[in-house]
Image (spheres, grey):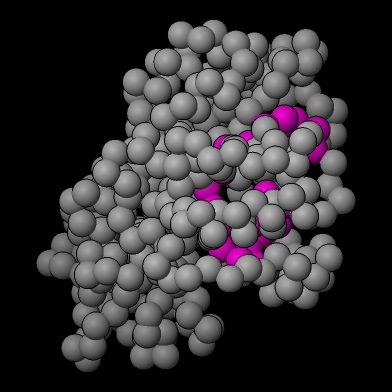
Amino acid sequence: MQLSDFDYTLPDELIAQQPAASREASRMLVVNRAGGAFLDDQFSSFSRRLDPTDVLVLNNTRVFPARLLGVSDTGAKAEIFLVTPLSDTSWQALAKPARRLKTGKHVTFDEKLGGVITRNDGDGNVEIEFDFDGDFYDVLDRVGGTPLPPYIRRESRSGGASDVERYQTVYAKHRGAIAAPTAGLHFTAAILDEIRAKGVQIIEITLHVGYGTFEPVRNDDVTHHSVLPERYEMSGDSAEILNSACSERRRIVAVGTTTTRALESAAANEKVFRAGEGVAGITITPGYRFRAVDALLTNFHLPRSSLLILTSTFGGHELIMGAYKHAVDARYRFYSYGDCMFID
């Protein structure tokens, strides 16, 4: 299929600029694959969509404040978005304005954090060597901003006080993500308790969301696109529960595309889940046969993105693109702080 097959028109006013008043207040579009039907619902009723025998899988990664605003040694403003650690002191990053941050340029973020650009490919990708006092992540917690995506266009886009809480799942544990696993943002502790009370088993895995998750698809033939590998970790208890669910033909319900990619990568060869670290290295495009995930909760994704391609592959291209048209017509809120879709 061509990249243009995953395009749709979205009015700017439907891009959520703020989170809903409360996490559970989001709307939820239920997509029934068997019947090809749509149902407008609320996320607060999500537990009613689950069976007592289901296993619900969450990604417990924690977003760290990866956006840094500073001033170069010539006095120009600079923005550095951390992507991948290269060593204890150096990072691969995205920079703005990249053309001014030439190799050797020093950027000051505050009195205890600065850095020197050690490589600039001229296309916005840089490497930066930091100088700092103390623990780097402690300094980041004080200096850095919440890494909100660029389509959130407001004065506090680099992260205000409310973003520190709301651009994080309530079950986030292990720091390392540069973007939130947004399907999980709708959950509250009370809803998770309600799901457990129903008998559903809830397990957690860890996949730190990196640049590959939202890197633009640049190939017209989507099967030629490759999503960068990301590491995930699974406990022994989680692997045991998943293996039991598979052998007993119980549903595995993934919360988010990152969780889906980790589970599918884990089950790619033997459909056996193993404890420990693994690599989510598969790219899910049309024709892929899902081995692990039976139902998916996901937010609405950008046109022409690898996340929309994954979602469309899971639900069926015609059905999912029809669901997106329905969501636009019904005035759903889109993207990270927007509403969600449950593909049943």
Residue nearest the observer in this picture, 37 or 338: 37
Range shown magenta? 290-312
Which residue is found at the position 55% from the left and 54% from the top? 327
Which residue is found at the position 75% from the left and 68% from the top? 5
Residue 291 sits inside the magenta stretch: yes
Name which quarter of the figure residue 144 lies in. Answer: bottom left
Please state if 108 lies on the left or on the right of 30 as rendered: left
Q: Position of residue 214 (x, y in %)?
A: 56, 61
Residue nearest the observer in this picture, 191 or 60: 191
Name which quarter of the figure residue 175 lies in. Answer: top left
Observer able to see residue 127? no
Residue 137 sits inside the magenta stretch: no
Which residue is found at the position 36% from the left and 65% from the top? 152
The quadrant the N terminus occupies is bottom right
Q: Position of residue 86 (x, y in %)?
A: 49, 59
Q: Residue furthest left?
A: 111
Observer able to see residue 2? yes
Please say if 178 is above or below 259. Answer: below
Please state if 199 lies on the left or on the right of 65 as rendered: right
Please state if 291 lies on the left or on the right of 328 as rendered: right
Which residue is found at the position 53% from the left and 84% from the top? 123
Please say if 122 is above or below 234. Answer: below
**Count of numbered marks:** 0
Residue nearest the observer in this picture, 264 or 104: 264
The quadrant the C terminus occupies is top right
Please say if 43 is above or below 316. Answer: above
Q: Position of residue 20 (x, y in %)?
A: 32, 46
Residue nearest the observer in this picture, 317 or 120: 317
Q: Position of residue 291 (x, y in %)?
A: 80, 33
Please state if 320 lies on the left or on the right of 220 as rendered: left
